[in-house]
Image: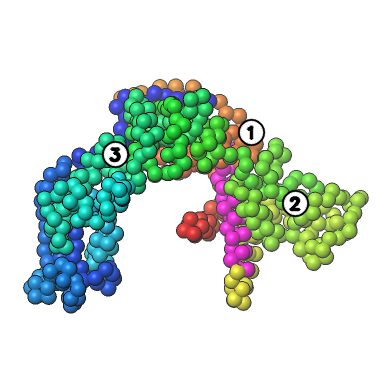
Amino acid sequence: MLRQSAAPAGVQTSLEDLGTPLAGVSFVVVDLETTGTSASKSRITEVGAVRVRGGRVVDEFTTLVDPGTLIPADVTLLTGITQSMVATAPPIGEVLPDLLAFLTADPNTVLVAHNAPFDTGFLRAACEREAVEWPAPPVVDTLRLARAVLPRPEVRNHRLGTLAAYFGAPTTPNHRALDDARATVDVLNGLLARLAPLGVTGLEELRAVSKPPTRAQREKRHLADDLPERPGVYVFTDARGQSLYVGKSNNLRRRVASYFTAAESRRRIREMAGLVAGVTPIVCTTDLEASVRELRIIAERKPPFNRRSRNPERAAWVKLTTDAYPRLSVVRVIKDDGAPHLGPYNSPREAEAAREAILHALPLRQCTHTFSPDRPVARCVLAQLGRCGAPCDGSETPAAYTVHADAARTAMTGDPAVVVDALTGRIRELAAELRYEEAASLRDRLTAFLRGARRAQRLTAIAAVPHLVASRPGATGWETVVVRHGRLAASAVLEPGTDPAAFLGSLTATAERVPAGYGPVPNATAGETELVLDWLTGPGTRLVEIEGEWTCPLRSAEAHAEMTHWAHGRASAQ
């Protein structure tokens, strides 16, 4: 059981979870007139910007811009901007520094536009052409907000002119930059007024709005009222007390409240709102503790509305068996037999790819026969082709086969060079022969092998450490954790003015006792141990005390991490 220590009353949480109150945001509403609709081919002819804070206009910026090209007749007819009007105007290269200075004058500035991708696309393209860095401020699109908040029966369309009239804007949009920006200000204020009763009071919630909250969401918002503004884990429960969804946050009350606002657009979570009857908060001292508790509760209770981390027991491993003639097997359970493992993998398919990578490099047997020199069996096709070194017919001794098994063990637990060299060499040959699909298949197998080897080696290394204490600076003091055999055993914050020796003695004395166990993850899930590893290897973390050694092989799979990182990024992009 993870020991839970009380956090100080005035704990400072992160800005992400606390949110940025809209009252403290400086909105800069921007409108552009251009020579066309293509940001790459067309150019800006006029800029209008209005700074708004607390619902009031505090500054304005406007200028015509020489586009350096002819303005089409239909554009002049629409905007009224003629070639002679921009003939003496400054070029965009002179306008950009002033505009960007206006945009970034306040560190809490948010850019607002109606159909924002159009305006930001032109501004980014202009910055790129002028070799000026685009500041990339947060963006709010009033067109998207209007579509989410104002259904079609209420307004006939979501054009700026229609919305300005609906909200009673004193300025009528006329396709001139400053007037359109002023009208957008009134539309923004009107939309914010509509969203406030729906619980959207922060910038993060505003930017997440995609549709109005359901009736069930609005009715359940009170469930967050009594929650603490502290870091921890929250558990949504139904009328029977069954867990529906588990999450974590640096500010429990604000995060839970967001589930019942227009900022929550996930279909499954909106459905869950109709079933929620209560919320159980679990206050934690550190973000690591909250992350670990979240994983443990999800794995234990398997709440139906959580999709990730529900079934860590289904993870697949590649095991080198320990019989007289070892072979590679995909398993879900790690036994106390000293066998080396790769993984864990999210699916047996990925584990099988890693297994095939090793088999490509080493002639391990693939059959499941139980045989010995005294009980020979007929040689299989793989043995006849020289792709299996098992002495099926008794022609070789177990010692001869052990060479292949030892090489596989070394590749899995230490230096993977024998597999890497074999597969990269074959990949180069296939690429030279223009057999790219086969090369890609081998590359994926190699990546799967390296990913599993890296995970298993990192997990095994920390699991071998019986006791470790580490600390890093946090918002209210030094966040300190006790890790035993890869499991988080205790977590607390050393506040200023506290005796470090007494604090450390109390923390370690009351920390959970964790036995050694066996395998890469003897006392925790792989997800928990990897959270601990990420925290321990993060910037600013200091090792306070350790028993035993925390080491990884010098030429381990970590040396080939660029392959696994590249493949992970490629998979995420698809």
Report the residue marked by disc 1: 517
Residue lying furthest right in this view? 374
Q: Nearer the viewer, residue 66 or 267?
A: 267
Name the residue type under label 3.
Val
Q: Is residue 33 left or right of residue 441?
A: left
Residue 357 x/y as whole percent: 65, 59
Residue 130 x/y as whole percent: 22, 69
Question: Which marked residue is nearer to the observer: mark 1 or mark 3?
Answer: 3
* Residue 170 to residue 235: above or below: below
Q: Is residue 153 visible?
A: yes
Name the residue type under label 2.
Arg
Question: At 90% across and 54% down in the image, what residue appears?
Answer: 376
The secondary structure making up most of the magenta span is helix
* Residue 440 to residue 326: above or below: below
Report the residue marked by disc 3: 200
| Magenta extent | 438-465
Asked which secondary structure carries label 1, the reply is loop
Q: Is residue 553 left or right of residue 135?
A: right
Name the residue type under label 1.
Gly
Question: At 29% across and 39% down in the image, what residue appears?
Answer: 200
Point out the tag, 1 or 3, that comes first from the N-terminus: 3
Point out the tag, 2 or 1, that comes first from the N-terminus: 2
Report the residue marked by disc 2: 327
Q: Which image quadrant for residue 463?
A: top right
Question: At 59% across and 60% down in the image, what residue appears?
Answer: 444
